[in-house]
Amino acid sequence: MTYTKQILRVNLTAGTCVAEPLNQEWADQYLGQRGLATKYLAAEIDPKVDPLSPDNKLIFATGPLTGTPTSTGGRYSVITKGPLTGAIACSNSGGYFGAELKFAGWDLVIFEGRSPRPVYLLLEDDQATLLDAAHLWGKTVWETEETIKQTHQDPQMRVSSIGRAGENGVLFAAIVNDLHRAAGRSGVGAVMGAKNLKAFAVRGTRTDSYTVAEPEAFFKAVAAAKTVLAGNGVTGQGLPSFGTQVLMNVINEVGGLPTRNGREVQFEGARAISAEAMHELRPTDGKPNLINHNGCFGCTIACGRISKMDPGHFSIKDKPQYQAASGGLEYEAAWALGAAAGVNDLEALTYVNFLCNEDGIDPITLGTTIGAAMELYQLGLITKEEAGLELPFGSAQALVKLAELTVAGEGFGQVIALGSKRLCAKYGRPELSMSVKGLEFPAYDGRAFQGMALEYATSNRGACHVRGYMISPEVLGIPVKLDPAATEGKAAMLKAFQDLTAVVDSAGICLFTTFAWGAEDIRSQLEPAIGGSWPMERMLAAGERIWNLERNFNLAAGFTAKDDTLPPRMLTEAANAGPQKGNVAELGKMMPDYYQVRGWTPEGVPTAETEARLGL
Ligand code: SF4
């Protein structure tokens, strides 16, 4: 089976690293990665714990398909209690780190306690060592990764680390691996920083770290599934050519692009920050922003963007380190740093995205928090004197300056570092935070897509698009076309999406495969990889079990049905333009259905029957 069957427990307080066998019974129920690590976390911490205290734990987890030849099988997740939200946090990343961790022989690595001084973990196959990181503290992700590789004379070492944002306690700090792949959301990087853990370096050379249970059936299924990806218009053409940025013009045209802190649903500058614009030659230097695309470990889609900025742009004129090619822009970052703040300067967005990768910060929360600050500034609640600069919507200069201040932990950046919920509460207008459970929603407006509205309201880690991507049926017609304005039937469809996504995130593959793969394409690879009998009902029940496990963690942490809602703006201020003009998010019509199809009480609590059915 494709588990390594061992986990590593790193006690940062005591400075010890101890191997222990994987709890296979839990793996059988929760698959791996997101599900399995959440099971360990829920069993080992008090859900009410302060996320930044030593009592919280931070788990790096691979799935049963991580490191296998399955397309996109290089994913890993970081699971903890999130400091931005106080809810369960699970952030998923690609690149090559996850596969390397599997090749070193580990399903999970659990960090607990807090080191008395900055350290990094060096994990070379079964040799785990905590090393002094005093010389790395204060360095960026990019510097840290390079320094560690040079120190150990191993360019093939994979490094996952925090930048200055994680050290400075930015509540939406990310953990970045392979220079520009990030476990980005919910502030997992802040937890890493609070533990004085600067980096996690891994080198795996074992050829026997796992075995495939039924190789012939597995490789046959993998080959068939890769053919499906190659033949699909989205995964075979759209994503490789245009990346996720292909969505910018599409979502804008259907009137679902939240603009200027969600006050509008279409952005007049969308085209200037779109995939198409990234391909075009710049008038300033005659070169395009986009220079290449790339993929994560084992990926046959390769949606990643590689960009090179105009060296004469105001943001990097005197900064040669940003004049080389680097990762980005992806759609969510381009939207958050662009439309959410009303900024249409593609080069400025590219630079700020570089900063987010370089210093480990979530661009979605950064951009949306800056958008909220701009609205507070426009209302006269934040002054120029307080911010240290003018903050009008649309100002690329303000976006760049605030991003620099935030990653450095300086000036008004210390306020942006709190995220939009705390920022808006500080200025007496909590309703202006476009967030759910403290996590800012991404690039789809809930007034235009009723299914996405319900997804934001119910997602266990706060407003999130990658827990049940209802844009697939509501815009792209995958697997069937649903009317985005309809509310009927959305609850059942969302539940199915959420449960299957929990399987995907726990298996070790990328969610983007589901533009082409149905549940059977995943099951047909998972079963011969793990071994044993995995009929569809068992696989989907695992997804539902994981969803309910996360729900129970949040309930125990203090969340209630009252938190399953949206910002008042989404519920009461109608969409101002586009095909969905006049609509608001109709949560009241969908939430009772949702609780019912989930087998929860009207108060949003899993019933005893549901818990018994799922073996919780
Ligand atoms: S589809 Fe994109 S994000 Fe997913 S594994 Fe491939 S390159 Fe990485």
Image (tube, helix red, strand yellow):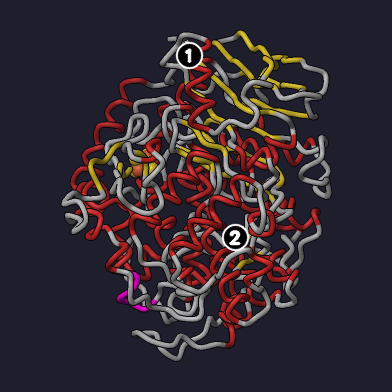
- Residue 182: horizontal and vertical position, in percent? 50, 40
Compared with 514, 72 (above or below) is above
Q: Secondary structure at mark 2?
A: loop
- Residue 150: horizontal and vertical position, in percent? 48, 13
Query: In this view of the protein, can residue 521 be seen by the observer?
Result: no
- Few, some or many residues within 10 Å of mark 1 (<14, 14–19, 20+): few
Q: Quadrant of residue 610?
A: bottom right
Which contiguous range is marked in magenta? 250-255
Compared with 557, 302 (above or below) is above
In front of the other: 211 or 232 = 232
Q: Nearer the viewer, mark 1 or mark 2?
A: 1
Compared with 497, 145 (above or below) is above
What residue do we see at 36% from left, 36% from top? 72
Label of residue 150 in the image: 1
Compared with 48, 485 (above or below) is below
What residue do we see at 25% from left, 44% from top? 229
- Residue 262: horizontal and vertical position, in percent? 51, 76
Type of amino acid at the residue the image marks with label 1: Gln
Q: Residue furthest bottom?
A: 582
In front of the other: 114 or 214 = 114
Q: Is residue 373 left or right of residue 344?
A: right
Q: Determine the quadrant in which ligand 1 lies.
A: top left
Type of amino acid at the residue the image marks with label 2: Ser
Q: Is residue 251 magenta?
A: yes
Label of residue 469 in the image: none
Label of residue 459 in the image: 2
